[in-house]
Amino acid sequence: MGFHDECGVVGIYGAENAAALSYFALTSLQHRGQESAGIAVSDGETIHLHKDMGLVSDVFDKDHFEDLKGSVAVGHVRYATAGGRTIENAQPFLNTFKLGGIALAHNGQLVNYEPLREMLEDSGSTFSSTSDTEVILKLIARSYKKGLEAAVVNTIQLIKGSYALCIMTEDTVIGVRDPNGIRPLCLGKIAGAHNGKDAYILASESCAIDSCNGEFVRDIEPGEIIIINKNGLKSIHLEERTKKQTCIFEYVYFARPDSVIDGIPVQEARYRMGKVLAEESPVEADVVIGVPDSGIGAAQGYARASGIPYVTGIIKNKYIGRTFIAPTQKERENMVFVKLNAIRSDLEGKRVIVIDDSIVRGTTSRRLVQILRRAGAKEVHFRVSSSPVKFPCYLGIDTPSKNELISSTHELEEIRKEIGADSLAFISLEGMIKAFGEDTFCKGCFSGEYPVACARKV
Ligand code: SF4
């Protein structure tokens, strides 16, 4: 898989230990971003922030929690999409204005970042980063004197793109999901979190609510703004502009298998895509294996539907961080040998069906086939649980440009030869939709049609 994860956000209201709960939640969202992590907490009067480059467990130690006391918090884990990979772009962003502080955590990407930034600079705003998130923060600040709610509504009407936001002031947390619901955001409750009262949690995925021992309440709807403060919960809908088109790759690859997004369990979606793939592209073989982590659900679905036994076959080294150094291009390409290895006893002398979630550049797939053959696989049949990725994403996922996407530049048979497999098949786009039983997704990287218009990456 050549896509990179995106970001994870969390918001906590009304917990005695909002920073600790944010820490748990962010740890469970770590798969969404490993470059930087941060938590902002309000003690009722001031917002305190700590953020740094690295994994959640590297960024925070016991001493930080001494300075992060309070019951309202937002947190973020980041993989850079818009903006560079520097500490200046780490989130949450915090600004203190005449009327108080605002901290903001964002998962997604604005497509009209440049004109908005230019407009703000022309009217005197200064920026400390190259992140589109800072633009959202400055827009909220600009109309903050009309009240927080009005400022957020005004801002939402100006920004275009994908966004799941957790915003906080000293005494309020706000969650926002873009009008197409491209990035996920859900709401949970944590029983008895402060003097016997319940706390609320907003998070990118439901697994973060589970990690706080909370109870899932519901998904935030596309175009919904949810405001949580001492008056309880208030929801505002920007109904005239909404149409659900959640990123289908959340299910294919990004989200954790134990999460449920918009009522669809991620692992169940992967099983079903594997099942459809088996129906569409059967092949005689002895075993089915999945490329960890996200190929496993689809492989189990394929095995179940085809009656061919599922075996583990491949092991992933879980301890390679983003900072692992591979100095040359060749070494970077060979990284897959460090990340993945085959289990010879599962594969030797067997005809193997291997399921991966996608093929992006093709480099990883080629190495993978080599690994399987080296472990004695007699035949390698490559099956892919997403359709060919032909177009880049500009809605929050870091993809290569179009001419680096192998499905954009090569025909199926050419790709098969390139990766060295005995056969190759992708699930069809119709098959993906059939697996879900509904068509409420962004499928831009397969079709080139995106929910939000934008200048194309080439
Ligand atoms: S273009 Fe692809 S990766 Fe980007 S949001 Fe749409 S489905 Fe997701």
Image (cartoon, rainbow, N blue to C red):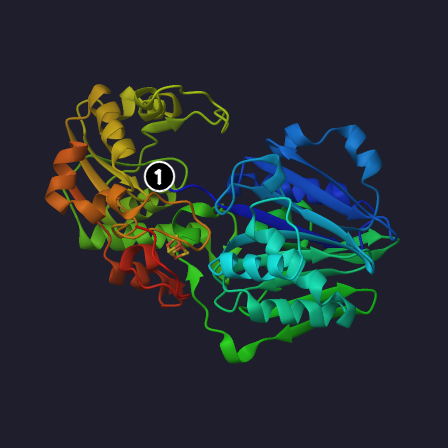
Closer to the camera in the image, 120 or 273: 120
Q: Is residue 326 visible?
A: yes
Query: Which residue position holds label 1?
Result: 2
The total number of labels drawn is: 1
Residue type highlighted by circle 1 = Gly
Q: Residue at x 23, y 57 (%)?
A: 428
Q: Position of residue 284 (x, y in %)?
A: 14, 41
Q: Secondary structure at mark 1?
A: loop
215 relative to 430 in the view: left or right: right
Closer to the camera in the image, 163 or 24: 163
Closer to the camera in the image, 396 or 354: 396
Q: Position of residue 71 (x, y in %)?
A: 82, 50
Q: Residues within 10 Å of mark 1 (few under 14, many from 20)?
A: some
242 relative to 413 in the view: left or right: right
| The furthest residue to the bottom | 240
Q: Is mark 1 within 8 Å of ligand 1?
A: no
Q: Is residue 74 visible?
A: no
Picture quarter containing residue 158? bottom right
Closer to the camera in the image, 429 or 398: 398
Q: Residue at x 29, y 32 (%)?
A: 364
Picture quarter containing residue 272? bottom left
Q: Position of residue 215 (x, y in %)?
A: 67, 56
Ligand 1 sits in quadrant:
bottom left
Q: In the rendered image, which quarter contains the N terminus? A: top left
Q: Position of residue 10 (x, y in %)?
A: 65, 50
